[in-house]
Image: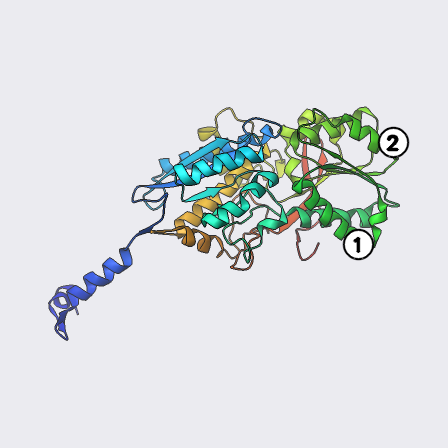
Amino acid sequence: MSVKTNRRAFIGGVSAAALLSGSTTAFAQKKYDDGASDTEIKIGHCGPYSGPASAYGVIGKGIEGYWKMVNDQGGINGRKIKFITLDDGYNPAKTVECVRQLVEQDKVLSTFNILGTPSNTAIHKYMNQKKVPQLYVATGASKWGDPQHFPWTMGYQPDYNTEGQIYAKHILANVKDAKIAILMQNDDFGKDYIDGFKKGLGADTGKIVKLVTYEVTDPTVDSQIIQLKDTGANVFLNIATPKFAAQAIRKAGELGWKPTQYVTNVSASVAAVIKPAGFDNAQGIITAYYLKDATDKQWADDPELKAWTAWMDKYMPGANKGDANYVYAYTVSFLMHETLKRCGDTLTRANVMKQAASFQKFRVPMLLPGITINTSATDFYPIQSVQLARFKGESWELFGNVMSAEGA
């Protein structure tokens, strides 16, 4: 039957045209919560543009550059992204203040990639009470994967607990008569790594000969590294954010201390950590990687790296391509972009979380080969695979196989 004939037909006294019109209206019905309209989607963010963790401030700048690209391309389903980003200085009290502004005054649809374990902990209950998505947070604390108790919060990167287990198992398998010295940031970020590390050591926790902590307000960690070196340890686990990780690597080098070193993924940036620490001091350090390293020559002809480089040149001119935080910003923004795209015209907070929890083997550009995004209503850990890398020359060199949480 032609469309023309169909429009003239009557079924039970109701024209097919009316049925057609009604179904189209139902299909096209738009649903919005605060922060969404026919023309705009408001996303909120805060990060440490100042303070002790300001090396991470480039993540917010990178995210800003990503949304500029999206808007230049027409937005998401015809809507432009309004990205509101505030400086919380890595101060949890300031994070609370910023997020209240984003939710109650700016009325964002969702927050996105707020950085820091202490910062996100400070707003965790608030966001869930308000039923506002606290999405793809920039911290690997294991607590972000608890949909039963906190259904509005989801992590992004591999969790610290799993990463800690992987380092422990690698040490046990590769370092003879290991004596382990640990530098730890004294907050939930550090404690999550330690919990996983001890879990990985199992009955061998006695191999930890000394653990010293530092506060993010400390000027340096020089005295802590001297204490660790004096133990005669042959393994150094560096659980620190970039500024302090770089200080620790440099000080160990100055002291002539040459243990097998492990640095957490959050401080694996060549530009923000390794170069300031000194390339000579960083040779042989091991970390867990899940992103492609833009300084690694093996990706020189990789189409994903070329696309990322073109984006950097256009939207982040003059930015340091050796800073892995820009790769991180690009990948997490790509995932948020896809999440919002899948929402279609149902831009409610509940649907944002529903879409975030429905990725299966989804490929995000600039993740390492074999690493994909997988989530469900009961699994709020998007990335649970890593590959170990060793620093050589002026870049990271991958080795071994991709390792998952199950294999840790």
The answer to whether 191 appears left or right of 102 in the picture is: right
Q: Are marks 2 and 1 in contact (CB under 8 Å)?
A: no
- Res. 169 mark: none
Q: Nearer the viewer, residue 226 or 331?
A: 226
Q: Nearer the viewer, residue 95 or 235?
A: 95
Instruction: Give the residue displayed 13% in from the left and 64% down from the top.
Output: 4
Say if 10 sits above or below 76 in the image. below
Check disc 2 and report the residue beneath it: 230
Quadrant where the image shows the C terminus: bottom right
**Residue lying at the far left of the rendered structure:** 8
Q: Amino acid at mark 2?
A: Asp
Say if 182 sits above or below 375 in the image. above
Secondary structure under tag 1 reads helix
Say if 228 sits above or below 358 in the image. above
The answer to whether 25 appears left or right of 141 in the picture is: left
Horizontal and vertical percent position of residue 166: 72, 49
Check disc 1 and report the residue beneath it: 202
Quadrant where the image shows the N terminus: bottom left
Horizontal and vertical percent position of residue 384: 61, 52
Say if 149 sits above or below 261 in the image. below
Horizontal and vertical percent position of residue 301: 55, 38
Horizontal and vertical percent position of residue 41: 37, 42
Secondary structure under tag 2 reads loop
Q: Is residue 135 something that shows in the picture?
A: no
Q: Give the mark nearer the N terminus: 2 vs 1.
A: 1
